[in-house]
Amino acid sequence: MAARSNFKAKDFDLILASSIKTGSTWFIAIIPTIINPNVRITNGDRDDDDNDPLLKHHPNELMPSLELQLFKVNPNPDLSGMPSPRLF
């Protein structure tokens, strides 16, 4: 309920909303890669897996959940420091 009451959306926010078991984890992994294609650094023609965020982090760590990771800890979190586009 805190997320519903206190969340203030911005024009460029991206919110993934889906039912369970519909591929949301896959989307959570793909969306940051599409938005930030240069996150993965390459060595010449070979990808450098050491710089791949998906190999170091679970997709849910790359795109926070409004209810579970942000508003559960603090009913009114300061989201103003998140870079645009904000992903949820």
Image: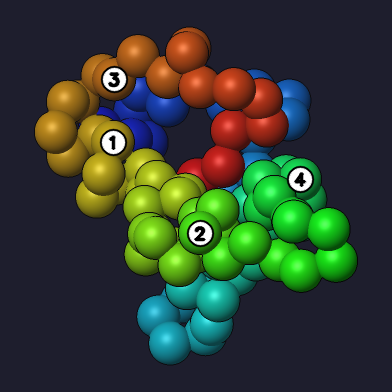
Q: Could you tell me which residue is drawn at 63 percent across and 62 percent down?
A: 48
**Residue on which disc 1 sits:** 70
Residue 32 locus on image (x, y percent): 63, 52
- Which residue in the protein does label 3 denote? 77
Marks 2 and 4, how far apart at CA? 14 Å
Q: Given contact means CB atoms under 8 Å apart, are the residues at marks 3 and 4 in contact?
A: no
In the rendered image, the residue lying farthest to the left is 73
Q: Amino acid at mark 1?
A: Leu
Q: Residue 71, located in which quarter of the rendered image?
A: top left
- Look at the numbered discs 1 and 3 and tell me whether their residues touch, using CB distance below 8 Å: yes
Residue 75, how many percent across, how many down? 19, 25
Vertical order, 5 against 59 (above or below)? above
The mark found on residue 9 in the picture is none
- Disc 4 designates what residue? 38
Binning the other alpha carbons within 10 Å of mark 3 as few (below 14), some (14 to 19) or many (20 upward) gives some
Give how far apart the Cα atoms at labels 2 and 3 are.
32 Å
Q: Amino acid at mark 4?
A: Asn
* Foreground: disc 2 or disc 1: 2
